[in-house]
Image (cartoon, helix red, strand yellow):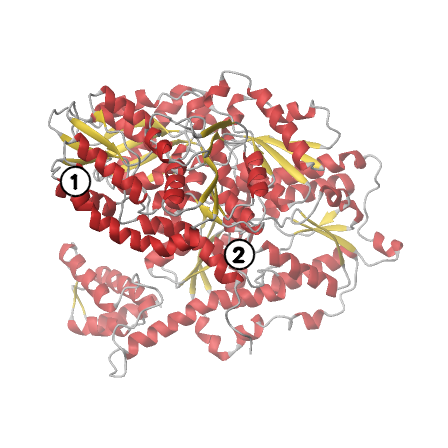
């Protein structure tokens, strides 16, 4: 039993709903009690969808449990098929139905329908949402394509040459409630098309069962979100020989590497290598002198595996930040995140507990947080600027404007989204510096709201602590005066370091000189 | 009652389960913690309905059952013990801990009553433990509050002192207004259940006169009756009419003259009618379809028809307690179609066929209906907004006029393009 106050991922059947809702001509009969219908609002409210998810909940009640819940399942399946006429039917159960073991998938298969039926077994007590989405997508592909395995030849990534046409690829993984998937798909299709590569099928987002059957018309698969699509890509590779890409095109370097990887797999010559560097404004914006102040900015990163790893690479290599914390809630991606963290000399944080993340954030004393909506709230409480880089989805993460994370435009979006909160940080410093000028309007509101501590508060909290502290360290007038001059966003860190230094050296009173001694000691 | 048409429907539903009521119960009693014993689905449901992220640490959580807990029940009890110990160590300010049963815990027959009893012994004098079920196989949405309140009744001491007991969670400001009005009427001993502090439970007995503020408390009412309380029969205090009848019923139980009631509430009624005018202008003659969810549907239908002159197409309700709703049903217009239960697909067919001007429904259905060109109002807002009482009648009407008004604005052309 695990105490959970808030969870990054929903249960696995919500993952299955993400696949079903992303697609056309599919219906999902979910053996579940009435309360589970809450999941509809994830799609209709967060994604602002104008259609209900294609899901029928069997809505069994306590009084049904003594009787025949299996009959109830069959009745709902029959009604759903008659009403919605899906081309493929998904049948599964949520946590409670798993316990009563009606086996709705087997029941559906015995009802004599001539459409393909996917029997979803998603263990609700050990797995979570992303796993459920991945498994559903995989089972769907397997169900629709398994008969073709025996009479299909291995697909050579070079066969487009024989066919005398442009190479074709599938883009796999984008789904509803995935982070900026809607726009990433457009960006990646545009990039591929510029390189003379056609998109065969995008799935699950916008695909129908017919499209799934057409997957094998492509030469290779683009595994855009491994959390959702890797298992499917692996199955297609094993059974049809279809190769798939490993690079996630988030950030300039990864986008270029992604293009290289695709070309290499297809044996397609890359003719515009030089041009690629200039497709996004990120490299120049990052190089321009006004970005000097970004150097060494301390960032704390937490999110799903894919976005956290990509963020770390961009932060370090493309923006010149210092990564002071990296973690993920995706246990399936823990190995990769640990490897990246090791390269960055930080310890990876793998947890589903947001309070642990908040603690780690506090300890790392970052100047910028890149996280989920939950980290945005934690950072707000700590008065640290934050940009959201990952699911779980919030209505704010479905912007009206075109706003991808991947490709060239994605890099532009990332530059703006990550740097603007810091620009505000600089503005904050200016406000602090100039607040004694007579032109300054008193009561200027910080964009950080009321959580950002001003100098007075820091010093006050300091006094309180001093009285209780065993070491009895005292800040002298000159020490305080110097501390006030330190920009607010590093002031806390400077204060802690100076005190640490004073304790280390047995200095009872901190003066302006102590501050400088400590600065020299820690630099 | 015969003038109203009653129907029953079964099938797939689109309603929240009783766990959802934790969202307002924990705000009502800031010294209580609600621990759901359930699955990741339960945790996800509550956080999706409650916007948990705004809290540094919410006063509700889920002990998520894992595979190893399902293997043997003895383990599950020990595990729950451990979770509770950790929780109390972390949140020492908690005075009452509600162990809330869920669909999975009910199906595996996890005995939360026994767990609560053991914990009560161990933490005696520090934390009190009560248990109830908010499971979706037994309860819908607001029914969760019924379970929570029923669970507290055994902890209430007896007293034969005469008092008015308001039962059902109200917004604090509304509660204060009601108490002031009752005091002006001459009723001085007034208490609320649930109280604002979980430890300050009212004492009850044969001279306790219970006045319900919410229509979803069937089990609580039954247990209060068993404890000798007198239940005042009245419509619910939504709108001017309902609130007036509600005050009158209470006054009658305390032998206060009708004249006195009218004397005190007339100025309130007059200004409320004035405030209601602008909303009535928008709502008048508009056709309303209520889907079942909050259990407030019958009272809302009565208010929106009688005071805002809307036409009622269908009034859905998750379940119907005819006894509790008697006074409300009597106030409904002839031929009102009440549908108990739900077959969401068939009901939506009827929505489309009847082409209503406004549909009251859950959040899962609102945007899809809007996309079809049908204006909607989410029912969950009714349980979070202060809507009770005469002074709030216009605000209550405003919840329904707003979507219509907005629609009007967005479809009208008032500025000429230059």
Q: Is the residue A211 above or below the residue A497 in the image? A: above
Q: Is residue B368 left or right of residue A151?
A: left
The answer, for residue A506, to whether it is visible in the render is no
Looking at the rendered image, the quarter that the C terminus of chain A falls into is bottom left
Q: Nearer the viewer, mark 1 or mark 2?
A: 1
Secondary structure of residue under mark 1: helix
| Residue of label 2 | A398
| Residue of label 1 | B259
Same-chain status of marks 1 and 2: no
Rendered residue at 16%/72% (across/down): A477
The answer, for residue A21, to whether it is visible in the render is yes
Q: Is residue A12 left or right of residue B208?
A: right
Residue A461: x and y, percent? Answer: 20, 60
Q: Which chain is disc 1 placed on?
A: B
Q: Is the residue A1 above or below the residue A469 in the image? A: above
Looking at the rendered image, the quarter that the N terminus of chain A falls into is top left
| Closer to us: B338 or B176 | B338
Displayed quadrant of residue B44: top left
Instruction: Count neighbours of disc 2 (C-alpha within 10 A) and say few if under 14, some if 14 to 19, many if 20 or more.
Output: many
Residue A459 badge: none
Residue B361: x and y, percent? Answer: 47, 42
């Amino acid at each position: 039993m695990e105490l959970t106050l808030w969870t990054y991922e929903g249960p696995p059947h919500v993952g299955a709903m993400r696949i079903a809702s992303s697609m056309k001509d599919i219906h999902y009969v979910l053996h579940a009690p009435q309360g589970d219908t809450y999941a509809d609002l994830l799609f209709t409210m967060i994604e602002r969808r104008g259609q209900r998810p294609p899901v029928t909940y069997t809505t069994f009640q306590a009084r049904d449990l003594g009787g025949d819940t299996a009959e109830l399942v069959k009745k709902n399946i029959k009604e759903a098929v008659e009403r919605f006429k899906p081309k493929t039917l998904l049948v599964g159960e949520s946590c409670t139905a798993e316990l009563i073991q009606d086996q709705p998938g087997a029941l559906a298969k015995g009802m004599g329908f001539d459409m393909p039926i996917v029997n979803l077994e998603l263990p609700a007590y050990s797995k979570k949402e992303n796993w459920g989405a991945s498994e559903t997508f995989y089972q769907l592909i397997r169900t629709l394509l398994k008969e073709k395995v025996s009479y299909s030849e291995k697909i050579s990534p070079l066969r487009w040459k024989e066919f005398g046409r442009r190479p074709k690829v599938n883009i796999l993984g984008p789904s509803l409630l995935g982070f900026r998937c809607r726009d990433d798909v457009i960006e990646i299709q545009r990039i591929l098309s510029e390189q003379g590569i056609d998109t065969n099928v995008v799935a699950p987002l916008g695909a129908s069962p017919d499209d799934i059957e057409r997957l094998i018309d492509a030469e290779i698969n683009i595994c855009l979100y491994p959390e959702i699509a890797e298992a499917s890509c692996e199955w297609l590779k094993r059974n049809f020989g279809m190769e798939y890409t490993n690079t996630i095109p988030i950030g300039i370097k990864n986008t270029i590497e992604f293009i290289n990887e695709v070309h290499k797999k297809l044996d397609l010559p890359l003719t515009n290598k030089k041009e690629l560097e200039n497709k996004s404004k990120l490299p120049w914006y990052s190089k321009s002198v006004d970005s000097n102040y970004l150097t060494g900015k301390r960032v704390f990163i937490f999110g799903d595996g894919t976005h956290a790893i990509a963020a770390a690479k961009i932060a370090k290599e493309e923006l010149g930040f210092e990564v002071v914390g990296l973690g993920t809630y995706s246990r399936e991606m823990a190995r990769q995140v640990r490897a990246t963290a090791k390269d960055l000399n930080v310890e990876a944080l793998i947890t589903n507990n947001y309070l642990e993340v908040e603690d780690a954030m506090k300890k790392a004393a970052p100047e910028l947080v890149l996280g989920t909506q939950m980290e945005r709230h934690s950072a707000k409480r700590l008065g640290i600027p934050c940009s959201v880089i990952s699911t779980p989805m919030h209505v704010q993460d479905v912007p009206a404007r075109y706003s991808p994370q991947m490709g060239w435009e994605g890099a532009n979006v990332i530059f703006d989204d990550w740097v603007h909160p810091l620009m505000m940080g600089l503005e904050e410093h200016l406000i602090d510096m100039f607040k004694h000028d007579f032109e300054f309007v008193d009561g200027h509101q910080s964009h950080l709201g009321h959580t950002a501590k001003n100098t007075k508060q820091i010093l006050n909290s300091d006094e309180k602590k001093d009285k209780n502290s065993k070491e009895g360290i005292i800040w002298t007038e000159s020490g305080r005066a110097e501390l006030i001059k330190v920009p607010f966003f590093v002031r806390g860190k400077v204060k802690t370091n100076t005190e640490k230094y004073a304790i280390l050296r047995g200095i009872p009173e901190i003066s302006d000189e102590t501050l400088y001694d400590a600065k020299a000691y820690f630099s | 009652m015969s003038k109203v048409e009653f129907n029953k429907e079964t099938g797939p539903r689109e309603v929240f389960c009783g766990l959802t009521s934790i969202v307002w119960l924990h705000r009502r009693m800031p010294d209580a913690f609600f621990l759901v014993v359930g699955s990741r689905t339960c945790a996800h449901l509550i956080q999706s309905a409650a916007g948990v992220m705004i809290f540094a640490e919410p006063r509700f959580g889920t002990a998520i059952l894992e595979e190893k807990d399902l293997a043997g029940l003895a383990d599950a009890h020990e595990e729950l013990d451990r979770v509770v110990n950790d929780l109390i160590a972390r949140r020492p300010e908690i005075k009452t801990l509600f162990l809330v049963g869920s669909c999975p815990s009910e199906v595996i027959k996890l005995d939360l009553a026994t767990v609560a009893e053991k914990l009560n012994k161990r933490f005696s004098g520090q934390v009190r433990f009560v248990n109830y079920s908010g499971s979706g196989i037994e309860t819908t949405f607001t029914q969760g509050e019924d379970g929570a309140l029923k669970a507290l009744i055994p902890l209430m001491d007896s007293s034969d002192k005469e008092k008015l007991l308001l039962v059902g969670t109200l917004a604090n400001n509304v509660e204060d207004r009601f108490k002031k009005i009752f005091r002006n009427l001459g009723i001085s001993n007034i208490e609320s259940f649930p109280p604002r502090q979980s430890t300050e439970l009212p004492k009850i007995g044969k001279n306790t006169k219970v006045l319900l503020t919410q229509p979803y408390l069937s089990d609580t009412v039954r247990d209060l009756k068993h404890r000798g309380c007198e239940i005042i029969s009245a419509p619910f205090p939504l709108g001017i009419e309902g609130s007036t009848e509600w005050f009158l019923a209470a006054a009658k139980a305390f032998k206060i003259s009708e004249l006195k009631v009218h004397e005190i509430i007339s100025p309130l009624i007059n200004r409320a009618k004035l405030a209601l005018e602008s909303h009535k202008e928008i709502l008048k003659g508009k056709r309303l379809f209520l889907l079942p969810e909050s259990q407030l549907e019958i009272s809302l239908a009565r208010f929106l028809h009688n005071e805002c002159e809307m036409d009622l197409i269908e009034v859905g309700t998750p379940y119907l307690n005819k006894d509790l709703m008697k006074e409300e049903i009597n106030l409904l217009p002839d031929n009102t179609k009440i549908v108990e239960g739900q077959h969401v697909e068939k009901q939506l067919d009827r929505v489309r066929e009847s082409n209503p001007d406004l549909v009251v429904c859950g959040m899962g259905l609102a945007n899809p209906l809007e996309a079809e060109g049908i204006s909607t109002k989410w029912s969950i807002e009714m349980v979070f907004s202060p809507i009770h009482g005469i002074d709030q009648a216009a605000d209550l009407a405003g919840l329904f006029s707003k979507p219509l008004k907005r629609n009007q604005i967005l479809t009208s052309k008032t500025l000429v393009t230059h």
